Image (cartoon, rainbow, N blue to C red):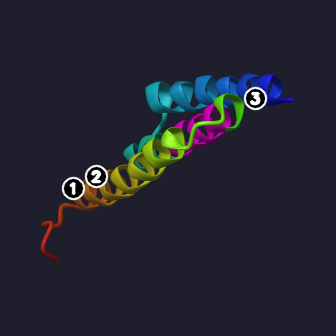
Amino acid sequence: MIGFGFIILSICCVLCLYRVAKGPTPADRTVAIDILGIIVVGFCVLLSLKTGKDFYINVGLAWALLSFIGTIALSKFLEGRGFDE
């Protein structure tokens, strides 16, 4: 069952990478990059379930926080606003 989850997440990863490469607007690319961050967290959760080690959950949490901050910074850059606004 966990192997099926890895397959589904891999397919989603390929589709998101396609959207990053061929996205018609920068906003589409930003959303695809954000979804890739969520997929990485999903991979971390599945690895944690498979190995029984909670270290991967900590990595997933850190990745989610950094992905959120990066998405906010990228969206502010695309709007042309400063980081302090």
Q: Main secondary structure of the magenta part?
A: helix
Q: Which residue is mark 3?
A: 8
Q: Please give the range of residues in magenta.
A: 37-48
Query: Label 2: few (<14), some or many (≥20) within 10 Å?
Result: some
Q: Nearer the viewer, residue 34 or 54?
A: 54
Residue for badge 1: 77
Residue 22 magenta-highlighted? no
CA gap between label 1 and label 3 equals 32 Å
Give the x, y percent position of residue 46.
67, 35
Crowding at label 1, few (<14), some or many (≥20) Cα neighbours within 10 Å?
A: few
Looking at this view, name the residue that lies furthest to the right: 1
Q: Quadrant of the C terminus?
A: bottom left
On-image quarter of the N terminus: top right
Residue sitting at x 57%, y 32%: 16
Q: Is residue 38 magenta?
A: yes
Give the side of residue 82 with respect to residue 18, left or right. left
What residue is shown with label 2?
74
Q: x and y percent of residue 17 in the render?
A: 52, 26
Distance of label 3 from label 2 (alpha carbons): 27 Å
Q: Are marks 2 and 1 in contact (CB under 8 Å)?
A: yes
Alpha-carbon neighbours of circle 3 within 10 Å: few (<14), some, or many (≥20)? few
